[in-house]
Amino acid sequence: MRSIKGLFIMVAGLAIMVSFTYYANAQYKEMKGAPARVDFTKQLRPWDGFGFNYVETSQTTDYQEWPQDYGGFSLLDEQEKQKIIDLVFGKEGLKVGLVKMFLDPWHQASPNAESDHTTTTANMREFVRRGLQRTQQRGAGLEIVTTLYGPPAWATQQKFLRGRDLDPDMKDELAAYMIDWVKFLKNEEQFPVQYLSLHNEGEDWKRWPKDGSDGNIGTGHDYNLFWPPQQVVEFLEYLPGKLEEAGLGDIGVTPGETTGWFRFYNWGYANAIYNDNEAAENLGLITSHGFFEPTYYDHRWFNTHMSAGIDLIREKRPEIHTWVTSTSWSDMDAKFIREMYGNIYSAKVNGIIPWAGIQRPKQWVGGDPNPGCAIQVYEDSTYEVQRGYYFYKQVTRAGQPDMAVARTSSMDAMIAIIAFASNGTENPNAFVVINTSDEERPLNIEIKGTNGMVFKAYRTDKNEERYENIGTYNMDDNQQLFYKAPKGSVTTFYEKQ
């Protein structure tokens, strides 16, 4: 009896040792890099594309004295313009699919005056006209959102440019001001305008004194009007009907553009729309700027890539799309693209348009607080392609319109991955590896949902690499791709077709 019991204990002990050895080896096997995953079969939402924003008239208080052109196209010759259009819209360029156009306050001197849509917008319209032509030449199209930058002085209670408050007696006239501009773009320019956005950072009531007595123009601020949540809801109820009467029923109205997604939710805009069935139903597109500021201790610009407001509205409108209509170029580095990752995976957007992609620094009073860009134009009529262009190119070419955002993960906090599934388009599956650390990061990337085993790779970093072709990478038999991401780099992998 004792011998049987002893034998049982010995066998049991041996089994435990074998089991421990197995799990120890399994747990502590050598790992060449941080585990990461891309799954093209798990599609999170449709992708509308990345975009571009030309800003022309944004601060001047007297257009005759200062005919402002912040985008700088007016300084360039024909050859230079064509090169820039190719860089942004061409087959080998950014290949953007979205465009934002501002409606400035200078189109009508009084409510009964004749509209002038051409004088203050000539360069912006030329840029978009050329860009649309180049886009169509490569068999693609554009989607355009136009934003009320700020109303004419006559539409405000203060009756001066950049007055804080809308004059309620001018509601119809302001609606007509916006509608006439959209009609001009569609009928005269033949531009594919899809959306009309109500305001530019109109939630930021602190830009004015408490009594709204001074618009503080010319000290760094651009055009604006205060749009409290109830005013946004009122126009969402009202404006679509007016567009319909004008033969523009296909134009979707957006809730305007708060500074960031935190303000869109926390400052009451999403809740106001959700609580009003008519406003929620009339909403054509959810928009906001996507500026990111993680410091919330005594920092009024705090903003995160939170989806709470979007999620709330999607409870009623699950199909509705969401665009970021302005966001910082950061330091034109990997962090710039990491912020896009936040907008895509945290805020859950369908498209991104950064702040002014082409800039003429001398034209911004006080210095632009978001000076990064793709192309900079100088006063001597030359231009320079900035580092930000090549970082942006990593995502714009990967995430073409009508693709889909795919699920990703990374077990390294300094690594983020953005993936776009082909989704029936001619574009290949693609994923973008972002390394914001100051050291090289090795990765084992498991990839699901591909037809082949080979990926072509292109990389941009802070030094000499500018969307450089770095060759091909093969997946192993376990569907894994090993890659050492250099410090501060962004690398795009395209499935080889």
Image (cartoon, helix red, strand yellow):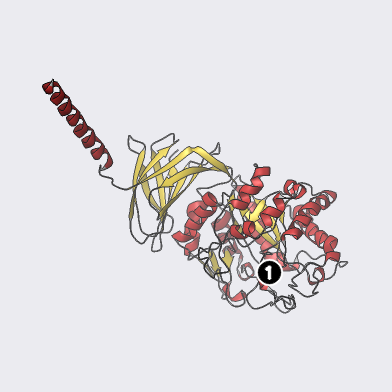
Q: Nearer the viewer, residue 388 or 80?
A: 388
- In the displayed structure, 315 sits above or below 390; it is above
Left or right: residue 429 versus residue 10 is right
The amino acid at mark 1 is Trp
Mark 1 sits on what residue? 205
Which residue: 32% across, 34% down? Answer: 477
Where in the figure is residue 81, as x and y percent of width and height?
59, 63
Can you name the residue that lies furthest to the left here?
3
Where in the figure is residue 459, as x and y percent of width and height?
41, 54
Which residue: 55% across, 63% down? Answer: 328
Q: Nearer the viewer, residue 386 or 274?
A: 274
The 10 Å Cα crowd at callout 1, few under 14, some 14 to 19, many 20 or more, is some
Q: Nearer the viewer, residue 188 or 264?
A: 264
Where in the figure is residue 263, as x and y percent of width and height?
62, 60
Residue 262 in which image quadrant: bottom right
Where in the figure is residue 67, as x and y percent of width and height?
70, 74
Secondary element at tag 1: helix
Left or right: residue 402 versus residue 465 is right
Left or right: residue 47 versus residue 238 is left
- Is residue 164 visible from the viewing direction of this image? yes
Quadrant location of the N terminus in the rendered image: top left
Quadrant location of the C terminus in the rendered image: top left
Can you name the residue that lies furthest to the right here?
112
- In the displayed structure, 286 sits above or below 364; it is above
